Image (tube, grey):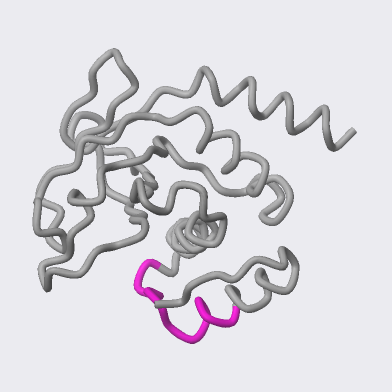
Amino acid sequence: MRKIIIILLTLCSLFVSCASTSGVDNENKVYLKNVSQLYQHEIELVEDIKLRRQFDALNYTYFNGYLKVDCIGMVKHSVLKNVDNSYYAGYAAVNYNQYDGKLVYIIAINENYVYDKGVLLHEMLHIYFYQTGNTSEGHGENFIRKAKKLEKLTGCPIPTW
């Protein structure tokens, strides 16, 4: 039964279209503008089917399918450069779509970490806290506690920085 649900989630993910904070095109891209934490203040994110499948499987298994992400994709290493010249392994964000005022949730994974399940789980935890109303959690106590619990369940190290 679990395999059937994962297959169905995967098939459904093929039909997911990306929403946007600044613009949407027909190629499942999302454009984020004015991303203050990043050196490059704009991200173009293209939906990645492999990442979506991995997200869906982890979401179903460890979050009971609770998490909703409008777009998940891989970006070049240089796009996730921080203003202090360090690099993010991944990036999770929630913004308002300027066209309809709805919340948009995205996950961008640095191309150098695309196969690191711990990085994806880390970003999924950020989405979890956004969607449970704790938007200011960051890497606080609750985040670290939840990450450690998830590490035990998955056997996968989850960075908490």
The mark total stands at 0
Quarter of the picture holding the C terminus: bottom left
Question: In percent of the image, x 65 and y 49: which residue is there?
Answer: 58
Residue 142 falls inside the magenta stretch: yes
Q: Relative to residue 160, is residue 29 drawn left or right?
A: left
Residue extent of the magenta highlight = 135-145
Q: Relative to residue 3, is residue 82 drawn left or right?
A: left
Q: Quadrant of residue 1?
A: top right
Question: In percent of the image, x 62 and y 78: which residue is there?
Answer: 148
Q: Nearer the viewer, residue 141 or 7?
A: 7
Residue 111: percent from the left, percent from the top?
35, 46
Q: Quadrant of residue 55?
A: top right
Indicate whether 85 appears above or below 69. below
Q: Quadrant of residue 103?
A: top left
Residue 154: percent from the left, percent from the top?
71, 63
Indicate whether 76 appears above or below 92. above
Q: What residue occupies the far right of the structure in this picture?
A: 1
Indicate whether 88 appears above or below 151. above
Q: Relative to residue 81, is residue 61 drawn left or right?
A: right
Indicate whether 142 appears above or below 91. below
Question: In percent of the image, x 29 and y 42: which residue is there?
Answer: 75
Q: What residue occupies the far front of the structure in this picture?
A: 112
Residue 86: percent from the left, percent from the top?
20, 69
Residue 125 falls inside the magenta stretch: no
Q: What residue occupies the far top of the structure in this picture?
A: 26
Residue 152: percent from the left, percent from the top?
73, 74
Q: Relative to residue 115, is residue 149 drawn left or right?
A: right
